[in-house]
Amino acid sequence: MSTKRCYYETLEVTKGADGSVLKSAYRKLAMQFHPDKNPGDASAETKFKEINEAYDVLKDDQKRAAYDRMGHAAFDGSMGGRGQGGGSPFGDFSGSFGDVFEDIFSQMMGGQRGAKRSNRGQDLRYNLEITLEDAFSGRSAEIKVPTQVACEPCHGSGAEAGSAPETCPTCNGHGRVRATQGFFTVERTCGPCRGTGKIIRNPCKACRGVGVVQKERNLSVDIPSGVEEGTRIRLSGEGAAGANGGPNGDLYIFLALKEHAIFQRDGHDLHCRAPVSFVTAALGGSIEVPTLDGGRAKVAIPEGTQPGRQFRLKAKGMPVLRSGQRGDLYVEIAVETPVKLSKRQKELLREFEGVSPAGCQPEAEGFIARLKDFWKGEA
């Protein structure tokens, strides 16, 4: 009968633990009992071998299924020598311990082992304010962007004319160097060349060896029809120049809309408020309202129109970006109360009120009726 400890107990997990739980438990225990952290401790070395053996079986679905059915007997004669030879004094853990720390190495090395650090220029942001008419029709805008550009005397290399950058002897042009300490191999940015892989012996006087200088650039931006507040336009490669010949960053233009004197925007729809006289609202009539494309639209006002009523004009709103569709225009009626009345006008209004039959002002009459009911209840 096998005297080996249960693999699940070795990893301190339950039998139903999934792969992520197994990996997390293995990582914790492997770090705790690794021989590099416990030099000269034979029990820690033995424990590390057991942990490695258990994880090597349980991480594999087929091996795990066999182990769950037959226990350690499933591997008698095939796993017996595991961890006792194979070159490493701590057993063969290329398929387990190495897998667990592969993601750690990847993060430490930026996901690119031995790759030279990129000297890509910075991305830039530019805030551009446009009118509602610009957003409606679209237009080309000229902007001035303070940025970094490649130095002309050295053509962005950073080296004085007549000389050139040399390959860094420390990293042999890779921009990264490796250091081995015990079990771990760590990769870091090369210090002498700062990751560029090049050494500049004679720096350019204009840019002091950086390869870029500050300058204001004039650019043209095409604003498409239908853009909204906060729309972002990306100009690839129009950002700051990269140091020592590195690629340019990008320029991001963020659009803001100026407040309009007549229209308010709501997505693809437009809203405007149109004042009408109380005579027009009472007797009916028509009004003209502007449209954002420079035209005019006629709105029929029915007899008895109340304040706040909206009329919808289809397809008179904003264009939908990159499509042939348009939103709607909503016209809200604002009934204006006349001011600075003459004596005769006041007499006519009082006469009108005196001869107004019941039902002439339904909202006011309904409100008064509700007030009477309310006051009765209070009494």
Image: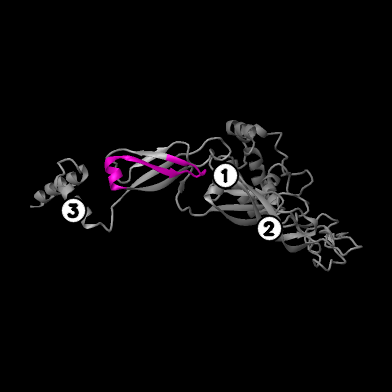
Residue in the foreground of this view, choosing between 160 and 79 = 160
Is residue 282 one of those drawn in magenta? yes
Mark 2: amino acid: Lys
Give the vertical position of 277 relative to 71 (above or below): below
Q: Is residue 239 in view?
A: no
Other residues around mark 3 within 10 Å, as few (<14) / some (14–19) / many (≥20): few
Marks 3 and 2 sit apart, C-alpha to C-alpha, by: 103 Å
Q: Please identify the quarter of the rendering in which residue 218 is found.
A: bottom right
The residue drawn where x is 16% and y is 44% is 356
Instruction: Give left or right: position of 266 versus 95.
Output: left
| Camera-side mark, 2 or 1 | 1
Marks 3 and 1 sit apart, C-alpha to C-alpha, by: 51 Å
Quarter holding the N terminus is top right
Q: Which residue is mark 2?
A: 37
What is the x, y in percent for residue 209?
Answer: 81, 65
Residue that extends furthest to the right in the rendered view of this protein? 162
Q: Which residue is mark 1?
A: 137
| Element at label 1 | helix
Q: Which residue is mark 3?
A: 347
Mark 3: amino acid: Glu
| Element at label 2 | loop
Magenta stretch bounds: 277-297
What is the x, y in percent for residue 5?
Answer: 60, 43
Q: Earlier in the sequence, mark 3 or mark 2?
A: 2
**Mark number for residue 68?**
none
What is the x, y in percent for residue 20?
Answer: 58, 43
Other residues around mark 2 within 10 Å, as few (<14) / some (14–19) / many (≥20): few
| Camera-side mark, 3 or 1 | 3
Mark 1: amino acid: Ser
Residue in the foreground of this view, choosing between 225 and 283 = 283
Q: Earlier in the sequence, mark 2 or mark 1?
A: 2
Residue that extends furthest to the left in the rendered view of this protein? 379
